[in-house]
Amino acid sequence: MEVRLRRVYESPSDADGKRILVDRVWPRGLSKDEAHLDEWEKDVAPSTELRKWYGHDAAKFEEFTRRYDAELAEPERAAALDHLRELAGQGTVTLLTATKDVDRSQAAVLAARLRGSGGPSRA
């Protein structure tokens, strides 16, 4: 299983496999054609409240991860995460986010859960 992380603004790569946006909000200034998505899995994204609390403050990432893990246990998000697991089991998936710090994002948390490990790995 290969799970990759990238910013949605980066040009697609042949090595991306399935390209899946995991943000709840559509990325600013990007058309759907430019995104080259296979899926937009917004149901797996953190809640608006958690996203706003975190504010991509690196000092809060550990607590964000703990709170996000709790949210991922909720039925709707758990089903979306299971869907990502299924896709990852079929081949390479690239989790996309608009966030500038991909390694401290919900995409990194999701990638770690899909890989069954704790740390992010960018491609």
Image: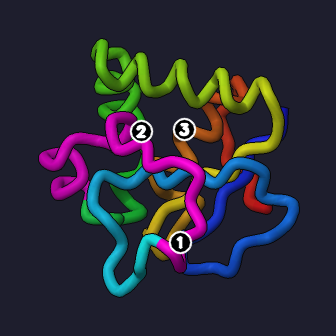
Residue range highlighted in magenta: 33-54
Residue located beneath label 2 in the image: 65
Residue furthest front in the image: 33
Q: How many marks?
A: 3
Above/below status of 51 relative to 43: below
What is the quadrant of the N terminus in the image?
top right
Residue 99 is tagged as none
Q: Earlier in the sequence, mark 3 or mark 1?
A: 1
Q: Of the residues shown, which amino acid type is indicated by label 3?
A: Leu
Residue located beneath label 3 in the image: 110
What separation in Å lies between label 2 and label 3 (alpha carbons)?
10 Å
Q: Is 27 part of what is drawn in magenta?
A: no
What separation in Å lies between label 3 and label 1 (alpha carbons)?
20 Å
Q: Earlier in the sequence, mark 2 or mark 3?
A: 2
Q: Secondary structure at mark 3?
A: helix
| Nearer mark to the viewer, of 2 and 1 | 1
Residue 42 % position (x, y): 35, 44
Residue 49 % position (x, y): 13, 46
Q: Residues within 10 Å of mark 1 (few under 14, many from 20)?
A: some
Q: Is residue 76 left or right of residue 12?
A: left
Q: Quadrant of residue 83?
A: top right
Q: Quadrant of residue 115?
A: top right
Q: Is residue 70 left or right of residue 31?
A: left
Which residue shows up at 85% across the image and 65% down it? 14
Q: Secondary structure at mark 2?
A: helix
What separation in Å lies between label 2 and label 1 (alpha carbons)?
26 Å
